[in-house]
Image: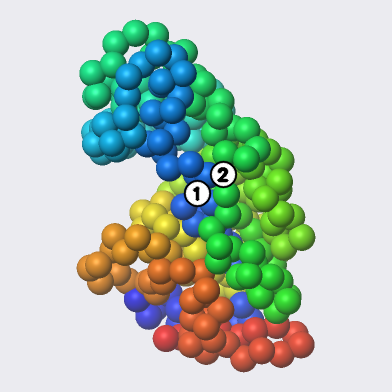
Amino acid sequence: MDPTLYAKTLGQKLRAVFFDAGLTLIRSELPLAERCAQTARTYGFSVTSEQVEKALPSAMSKMLQSHRDDPNIWSSDAKVARLWREYYINVFREVGVDGDLETCAEEIYAQYNRPGAWTLYPDVLPTLQNLNEQKYIIGVISDWSSNLPAEILLPLGVGPYIDFMVVSTIQREAKPGAGLYREALARANVGPEQAIHVGDNYINDILGARAAGIPGVLLDRDERYLFAVDCPRITTLHELPPLLDALGQTKSGSGPNIHSH
């Protein structure tokens, strides 16, 4: 990890923990390939989840290119909807499907915007409960459509533990820009040295948070980051409270204290 960032917290009480949403707190209730294949079959397309799985990397590559072309693509509900529809269309083109792909893509996108399409990882509620009991301010910072709070996260039971959510399409700006992180600091009423951010994407989460002066923790559930990274890396949220302890917390009635590592 980068010791200079964590040294900034020396002697400061760590008061807030921020989390990314997708692939950090929540995942698709059905595997993406299976959902795409099932939906395609209802529209008469002969597609298997195995075919879709093979097509996902190419479609994701095109999606990332769209993001590079428009770094603020996550700042508008209309842009996000178009981005995902194009992603699903590219998936089916990749497997050789020909037909009304727009309608099929629209249905998949609609499914992912309904309650029940997403589920919490098993380690989420225990971790949120733990941090809540320690009196942390807990926030969510996410590139997502504006329905994330009411239709996706709150129905999953996180409401008692999360103090606020900062969503890109509501704020009209996106990661890895520092704006969302600064908004989270303002809502938590803390300085960057009093917060830490946890997310699964090094560029969007770690570098984005760092641009606002906030140290980050990389959540690497699938162990994709096998090379050294300049921040703490965990593979499950169960590791987060012990990690904060290892960084030098001292629990007290006035809140924990984080030191350099």
Say which mark, if any, is on residue 118. 2
Tag 1 near tag 2, CB within 8 Å: yes
Looking at the image, tell me whether mark 1 or mark 2 is earlier in sequence order. 1
Q: Amino acid at mark 2?
A: Trp
Residue 143 visible from this viewpoint: no
Q: Residue at x 63, y 70 (%)?
A: 126
List the residue tagged with mark 1: 27
Identity, as a three-letter code, of the amino acid under mark 1:
Arg
The residue at the point 66 percent across, 75 percent down is: 130
Question: Looking at the picture, how far across and down is residue 145, in whole percent?
Answer: 57, 35
**Rounded to the nearest whole Å, what is the CA distance between mark 1 and mark 2?**
6 Å
Q: Is residue 106 left or right of residue 136?
A: left
Residue plotted at (57% across, 39% down): 117
Mark 2 crowdedness (10 Å alpha carbons): few <14, some 14-19, many ≥20: many
Q: Residues within 10 Å of mark 1 (few under 14, many from 20)?
A: some
Q: Is residue 179 above or below residue 45?
A: below
Residue 46 placement: quadrant: top left
Q: Residue 82: horizontal and vertical position, in percent?
A: 46, 22
